[in-house]
Image: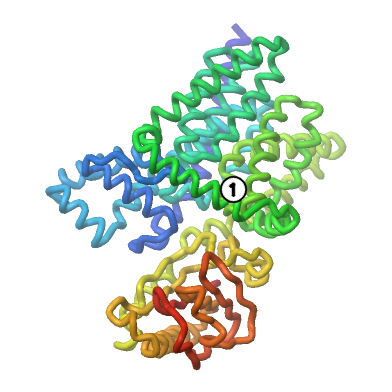
């Protein structure tokens, strides 16, 4: 009877702790809910939202197989369908046509709903991380792991965006939780883990990394070789079936799917595994601004603890495989989302281990240690929350496009693309590091100046108009004391950039285009090549930085 009472008290205490963690998480993620709106803002975000809306036409083929992101599209379609019913009841819209016009005129309500759903999903991952960490170790470890998770700038950044990462975080957390749910591995838990692994893969392919981690856990738990093979095969088969159920068009539209997947494979081959250069890039970019600094040292300490706690080995394997893919392909840091739950748990283990050692020697030093770690976490967390809610400079850019361009220049402005996440325009990591432009989170928006289709064939006049547009842009941003970087882009390899721009800085070829990075002042385009071919006309990108 007394044991039952203690268990109830322990469960109630865990619920209160989880509730506090959820409230803390919402306080960190909700401020970014309206960031950049009503612009169609973050790269990839509009792809999920617009494909979800497209399902309303009756076409459930997402026509996108590189992620594959099919399940997020279907889930968001249901959410936006509910929003349509609510707006119809409120007489805001009458027909689906009105709904689409609302999206085109001011998509704020649709994006806020989509982002709010992402916040709900990412917040739901917290109880699974907490319970998994408490099963592996104890309550203190669970608290540390959960705090590491919710204060990670990666978590804050992607929790409030209508992108696949929030979905992936939840499904990964659930897949791993069911494996660690009980001390004895059961078929029921393997089946549940396989189902959620399949849903995670139908969100993003890098969730495939969960499979070797789970198989490693099966081998650790079971001593019989036949049991290893039988349970591993069962897990793989159910995972595959789950993936196909939630991504049916992988089979139905297999020709397009194979083409998209081959494109991804070809891109990986082109990049290659330049290990040393990649590791330098990784060291620079997986940095305090992207992941809470406390994760790295305590994750390393967690690795060392694996010899004491074998249950950590599958989680460590998942993280190492994920890092290998990132450094091998130059992919953006958000590919670490699938590793965020294991990193948080490994870091929580390391932090709890170190805290217990210090506390035994001196209680006050232990309190000081926790205070220091709290400050260490708070600074990048504050930066991440502040960045997610910023809209002022982007709003200024929109107003400028409408009000400050001359008549000649106005026809050249194609669009403003706010909040560029990881610009793929600069393939050289060293130049990106020098300019702090790749994956550092300090690009506020980019302005693309391009010749309109009506005058595309008039090369000399094109260059003149582009130069006038640049002059207007730079005059405005310098007048407002805004920092910027100009990247000139020209549409054909045969058009020699040296004859068009002469700034005395390095150039880097990228996908048959030439890009020139300018650090300081604007200069007019002085020369052009009469014999040069311009397939798309001259284009200039201006990045507005912090």
Splitting the image into 4 quarters, where does residue 311 fall? top right
Splitting the image into 4 quarters, where does residue 216 fall? top right
User: At 60% from the left edge and 72% from the top edge, which residue is drawn?
Assistant: 508
Q: Position of residue 435 (x, y in %)?
A: 63, 72
Neighbour class for label 1 at 10 Å: few (<14), some, many (≥20)?
A: many
Instruction: Compare residues 421 and 244 and report the one nearer the observer.
Output: 244
Q: Please determine whether, in this image, residue 35 is positioned above or below residue 436.
A: above
Residue closest to the far bottom: 526
Q: Please determine whether, in this image, residue 136 is positioned above or below residue 77.
A: above
In the picture, measured across the screen, residue 95 lies left or right of residue 358, that is: left
Q: Position of residue 537 (x, y in %)?
A: 40, 78
Residue closest to the far top: 1
Q: Position of residue 162 (x, y in %)?
A: 41, 49
User: At 41% from the left edge and 53% from the top edge, which residue is drawn?
Assistant: 45
In the picture, measured across the screen, residue 174 lies left or right of residue 247, that is: right
Q: Please determine whether, in this image, residue 472 is positioned above or below residue 445.
A: below
Residue matched to label 1: 151
**Quadrant position of the C terminus in the picture:** bottom right
Q: Position of residue 540 (x, y in %)?
A: 46, 78
- Which secondary structure lies at badge 1? helix
Instruction: Compare residues 256 and 96 and report the one nearer the observer.
Output: 256
User: At 47% from the left edge and 63% from the top edge, which residue is drawn?
Assistant: 419
Instruction: Compare residues 396 and 521 and report the one nearer the observer.
Output: 521
User: At 45% from the left edge and 73% from the top edge, which residue is drawn?
Assistant: 491
Instruction: Compare residues 113 and 358 and report the one nearer the observer.
Output: 113
> Is residue 359 visible from the viewing direction of this image?
yes
**Quadrant position of the N terminus in the picture:** top right
Q: Please determine whether, in this image, residue 342 is positioned above or below residue 509.
A: above
């Amino acid at each position: 009877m007394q044991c039952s009472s203690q268990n109830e008290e322990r469960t109630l205490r865990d619920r209160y702790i989880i509730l506090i963690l959820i409230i803390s998480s919402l306080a960190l993620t909700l401020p970014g809910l309206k960031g950049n709106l009503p612009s169609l803002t973050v790269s990839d975000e509009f792809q999920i939202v617009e494909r979800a809306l497209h399902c309303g036409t009756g076409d459930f083929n997402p026509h996108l197989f590189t992620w594959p992101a099919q399940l997020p599209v279907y889930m968001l379609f249901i959410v936006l369908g509910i929003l349509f019913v609510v707006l119809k009841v409120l007489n805001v819209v009458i027909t689906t046509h009105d709904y689409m016009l609302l999206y085109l005129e001011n998509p704020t309500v649709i994006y806020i709903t989509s982002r709010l759903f992402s916040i709900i999903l990412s917040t739901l991952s917290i109880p699974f991380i907490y319970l998994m960490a408490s099963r592996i170790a104890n309550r203190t470890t669970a608290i540390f792991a959960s705090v590491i998770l919710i204060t990670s700038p990666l978590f804050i950044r992607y929790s409030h965006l209508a992108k696949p990462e929030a979905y992936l975080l939840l499904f990964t957390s659930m897949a791993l939780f069911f494996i660690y749910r009980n001390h004895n591995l059961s078929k029921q838990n393997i089946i549940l883990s396989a189902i959620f692994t399949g849903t995670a893969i139908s969100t993003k392919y890098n969730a495939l990394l969960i499979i070797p981690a789970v198989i490693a856990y099966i081998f650790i738990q079971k001593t019989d070789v036949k049991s290893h093979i039988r349970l591993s095969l069962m897990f793989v088969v159910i995972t595959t079936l789950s993936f196909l159920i939630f991504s049916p068009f992988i089979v139905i539209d297999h020709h397009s799917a194979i083409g998209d997947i081959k494109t991804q494979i070809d891109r990986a081959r082109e990049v290659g595994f330049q290990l040393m250069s990649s590791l330098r890039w990784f060291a620079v970019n997986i940095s305090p601004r992207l992941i809470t600094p406390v994760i790295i040292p305590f994750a390393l300490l967690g690795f060392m603890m694996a010899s004491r706690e074998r249950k950590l080995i599958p989680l460590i394997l998942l993280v190492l495989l994920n890092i290998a893919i990132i450094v091998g392909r130059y992919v953006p840091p958000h590919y670490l989302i699938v590793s965020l739950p294991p990193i948080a748990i490994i870091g929580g283990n390391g932090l709890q281990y170190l805290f217990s050692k210090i506390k035994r020697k001196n209680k006050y030093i232990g309190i000081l240690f926790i205070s220091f770690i709290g400050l260490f976490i708070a600074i990048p967390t504050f930066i991440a929350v502040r960045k997610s809610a910023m809209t002022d400079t982007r709003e200024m850019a929109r107003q400028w496009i409408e009000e400050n361009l001359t008549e000649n220049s106005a026809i050249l402005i194609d669009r403003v693309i706010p909040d560029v996440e990881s610009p793929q325009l600069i393939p050289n990591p060293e130049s990106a590091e020098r300019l702090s432009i790749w994956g550092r989170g300090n690009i506020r928006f980019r302005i693309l100046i391009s010749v309109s289709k009506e005058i595309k064939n008039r090369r000399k006049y094109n260059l003149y108009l582009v130069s006038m547009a640049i002059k207007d842009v730079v005059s405005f941003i310098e007048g407002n004391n805004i920092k910027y970087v100009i990247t000139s882009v020209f549409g054909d390899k045969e058009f020699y950039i040296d004859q068009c721009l002469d700034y005395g800085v390095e150039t880097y070829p990228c996908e048959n285009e030439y890009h020139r990075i300018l650090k300081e002042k604007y200069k007019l385009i002085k020369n052009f090549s009469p014999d040069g071919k311009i397939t798309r006309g001259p284009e200039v990108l201006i990045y507005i930085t912090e």
